[in-house]
Image (cartoon, grey):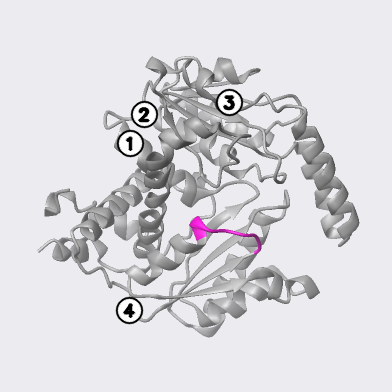
Amino acid sequence: MTTTAAHVPDAATLDAIYGRSLLVTEDWSVPELEVLLAVARRFEQLDRAGRPLTLLPDQLAYALFFDNSTRTKSAWAGAAARLGMRPVIVDGTSTQVEHGETAAETGAMLGMNSHALGVRHDLILGEGQRFMREVLRGITDYLAATGVPRKVPVVNLQCDVDHPTQTLADLMWLRERFPGGLRGRKIAVTWAYSPSYAKPLSVPQGLITLLTRFGAEVRLAHPEGYPLLDECVASARRSAAATDGSFRVVDSMDEAFADADAVYPKSWGPRELMLERVEANRARDAARMREIERKALERNASHRDWICDERRMGLTAGGRALYLHCLPADIGAEVSPGVMKRAALDVARQANHKLYVIMALLAVAKVEGLARRLEGAAS
């Protein structure tokens, strides 16, 4: 890949987004997202060329995880370390949140120690995004009250509404595979069967709200009882209308796959039961939580035929659609072994882009004069 200065992102836009947090992709305009992705591409080029990128030496990059993670946790740690930061991973279940500490108090405590904060809080509808915004408020209030000029951006590492680092990595990968852009490209975002657990709604919601902003023709498919949040569907419709793209909700996986250029089949929990989980969680009713999970998996099992297999891939454009998944995929349930075997390199490369997206989010928020620094890195 080239590493010439012509690829340095626009300095004025970089200055405008300095210090910004990212809690949902809709908080940022399309031009701002374009600049963020340009920085991510630049970091990828420089990294692969072996150029030093220690722009934030010895700063602390905290990450608070209330759910398990492999790719996002390692991408956060790797991105921070690549910039010279020191990643600090905090297990959310070990905090005082369970004992009544508020999100704002947690934010103030972590904000006084850290230089950036990532948060994953994705399992309970209505909780994760609210928690992150309160954490950001706690950090902001603490820094203002103490007069500390430090910027402590908060990055959503997956909540109940959106998974920005994942979907931006997906967008980056799609653009690499479709260098002419997403306008006119048919992308299927579909539910798929999983026997493992009732997964969050945030990835499909993040996809439909982001990809429609870039002109894609998005088709969403799910069985009855698995709708996404109404506000996310409404946002996708508005974005599609504004970009001359399209957004349709269809009844079958086959219809979504027909002539698709890319497919993204993954499981998520039935919304009715995900909402029931809200009250059970607030009551700290572990038995009720287990019962809801059992019912969710039982309902999933009635849709075992929702699998991305060779027959369905044959329905796509030329039978060669790009297969995407945020991983880990339930092989034999969400996707057949044969399809996953053929897509193994693609999904690994898809996942790799998250490292550069997180590097970009940290750098645009933390590095003053980033355009100049990136230009210097090319020499």
Q: Are marks 1 and 4 in contact (CB under 8 Å)?
A: no
Cα–Cα span, label 4 and label 2? 37 Å
Q: Residues within 10 Å of mark 3 (few under 14, many from 20)?
A: many
User: Is 131 on the left-hand or right-hand side of 154?
Assistant: right
Height in image: 133 above or below 350? below
- In this view of the protein, which residue sits in the foreground, 33 or 94? 94
The three-letter code of the residue at mark 2 reads Leu
Q: Are marks 1 and 2 in contact (CB under 8 Å)?
A: yes
The three-letter code of the residue at mark 1 reads Arg
Q: Which mark is residue 182?
A: 2
User: Is 370 on the left-hand or right-hand side of 138?
Assistant: left
* Location of residue 58 in the rendering, given as x and y in whole percent from the top left corner: 37, 81
Cα–Cα span, label 1 and label 3? 20 Å
Mark 2 or mark 3: name the one nearer the start of the chain.
2
Residue plotted at (31% across, 60% down): 15
Q: Which mark is residue 184?
A: none
Element on which disc 1 rests: helix
Element on which disc 4 rests: loop
Residue topped by disc 4: 57
The stretch of residues the image draws in magenta is 66-72
Mark 1 or mark 2: name the one nearer the start of the chain.
1
Residue topped by disc 1: 175
* Location of residue 287 in the rendering, given as x and y in whole percent from the top left corner: 90, 56
